[in-house]
Image (cartoon, rainbow, N blue to C red):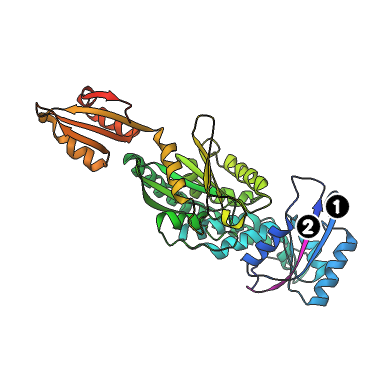
Amino acid sequence: MFDRYESGEQAVLVHVDLDDEVAREDLQELKLLASSAGVETLAVITTSRSTPHPKFFVGSGKAQEIADAVAALEAKLVIFNHALSPSQEKNIESLVKCRVLDRISLILDIFAQRARTHEGKLQVELAQLRHISTRLIRGWTHLERQKGGIGMRGPGETQLETDRRLIRGRMKNIMRRLEKVEKQREQGRRARKRNDLPTVSLVGYTNAGKSTLFNRITEADVYAADQLFATLDPTLRKLVIDDVGPIILADTVGFIRHLPHDLVAAFKATLQETREADIQLHVVDVADERRAENIDAVQIVLDEVGADEVPQLLVYNKIDMVDEIDAHIDRNEDGMPIRVWLSAQTGEGTELLMQAIAERLAKQMAHHELKIPPADSRWRGVFYELECIQEESYAEDGSWLVRVKMSLTDWQRLTKRDTNLANYVINQDVE
């Protein structure tokens, strides 16, 4: 159903510098997108405009220049670094005599190549269907046969209408299946909440190094590469943090400037992990000249999925690619970590990240000193199971003296289960 180009296809890239800062794209990012999609770039054509041309997006003279370049280089594909309307796409294709992709179609195709799990493939297909449904007329106008006269009468429904109906049916089917997946994910989240495991979610611009960092601190083997959208499918791993205990670390899909809304909607279930995390680790490529704009682009997507109010810890990655920057922690006026500078590739500074996570999660920890009588010695087993004992001894009367450190939710759960536990506290908020 989808127009897919072959990997390794040769293309001409088109980039327009627009006056509007919001609509402006990055040429270097287009080259990375094309490379990530397996496209060989034959030429790059650039131009400047105050506003897009309604017919070709570029001016008619520049459109002819693109057509001449395609003919001379025998290119099979033209890729625009912008979102094109269906009519603009159709007009340019008619002129250059080859396939035309806009930025959104290119990103969708990369997602289609990268998706590995059943859920990921469904999400990408749903986004593709939403996008292509507005562009069907380009491919089906020649099949319309509702004209009068003998031999010219159609079946009452054009091929275009048939295809739209089939697409609507397929979209409904995919959404039903994704709802089931979302329910399964919700059950998993509820189970983790019952176990009171804090969740830390990795977010950031695509190719910022999230998966490399994930592999470094969890010793996992998640696919990581120096390309855009190397990770689509979320991965969860259990990790033990000193002074905190076990947590869940989630690696998620990378964001990009002007991420297609269809993709944001399709990946809603995946991004739920980000929305319900206790802390977001916002990974930033410190070597990228546009890191400030990348941070803003990530925040825009987090706003869209309702994850903008989750506490954040900035992780400035790739310090090995920048001169005179050592691994360190930046703190606010209260001494709380707000930024960690490290290199996921070399491992420099990852221990500082663990320290910063522990300090941030410690705000949600309960510190208590208890005196538990021999008759209630069962609590010893409970505390050992939670791995929360810091120090223990025995009093002369046989009572057990213990200092514990656990998550606040764990403590509240235990005291709710047995109100006597709170009576055994002899000192609280101790370190």
Mark 1 and mark 2: span between their CA atoms? 19 Å
Is residue 143 visible in the rendered structure shown here?
Answer: yes
Amino acid at the residue labelled 2? Ser
Q: Is residue 353 above or below residue 114?
A: above
Say whether disc 1 or disc 2 marks the residue closer to the N-terminus.
1
**Which residue lies at the image location 79% right of the left edge and 45% below the top edge?**
20
Q: Is residue 349 above or below residue 143?
A: above
Q: Residue at x 15, y 35 (%)?
A: 378
**In the displayed structure, does residue 236 sit left or right of residue 145?**
left
Q: Nearer the viewer, residue 215 or 184?
A: 215
SS at mark 2?
helix
**Where are the magenta residues, as a range?**
7-14
Q: Amino acid at mark 1?
A: Arg
Quadrant showing the N terminus: bottom right
The secondary structure making up most of the magenta span is strand
The residue lying at 13 percent from left, 30 percent from top is: 376
Dot 2 corresponds to which residue? 87
In the image, residue 50 lies at what x, y percent? 86, 49
Going by the image, does 138 lie left or right of 185?
A: right
In the rendered structure, are the residues bearing label 1 and label 2 in contact, judged by CB atoms less than 8 Å apart?
no
**Does dot 1 land on a helix, a strand or a loop?**
strand
